[in-house]
Image (cartoon, rainbow, N blue to C red):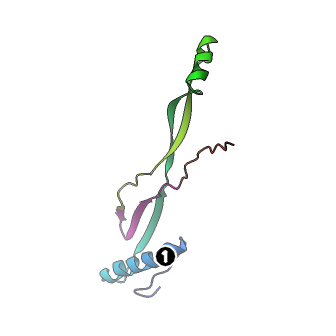
Amino acid sequence: MSSGQVNIVSGPPLLVQTAVESAKSFVSIQQDEATLGLLYHFAVIGPTTVPIPTTVRKGDAFDRIFLRMLGLKTERVVVEKKCQQGVAPANDIKVSGANIEIWIYGSGGCLMTETSTLLARR
């Protein structure tokens, strides 16, 4: 490998150009002819779904009167799932001799649609 040359081993195509430019800046800082190893780690922390229980009444007031008379429950628990965005840790650089590991973290956003029931009445 000649001085100032950057070789790509593997990686996501969308991030290669940024990694190459960053690696070239590290190579230009290096003054001697020793080989400098750079290893980039790109990690995306995804969102999680959190169950949220909610208590709702069954039917209308008239329906609940009959449910009480029969000794049945007038409420029920509905579990909705809400999206919670992941929290990425701080970026990190680890140096070991002529090898440098760069950890770049990101977080993925929530992409969930809300569901609802549509009642058609005549």
Q: Where is residue 57, by image quadrant?
A: top right
Name the residue at the front extreme: 122
Count residues near mark 1 (Cα–Cα under 10 Å), then give few for <14, some for 14-19, many for 20+: some
Point out the stretch of residues depicted in magenta.
93-111
In this view, 22 is above or below 101? below
The residue at the point 30 percent across, 80 percent down is: 29
User: Where residue 106 sits: x, y (%)?
Assistant: 43, 60
In this view, 100 is above or below 30? above
Q: Main secondary structure of the magenta part?
A: strand
Left or right for 94, reference 80 = left
The residue at the point 54 percent across, 74 percent down is: 13
In this view, 41 is above or below 46? below
Check residue 95 for magenta coloring.
yes
The residue beneath circle 1 is: 16
Residue type at tag 1 = Val
* Quarter occupied by the C terminus: top right
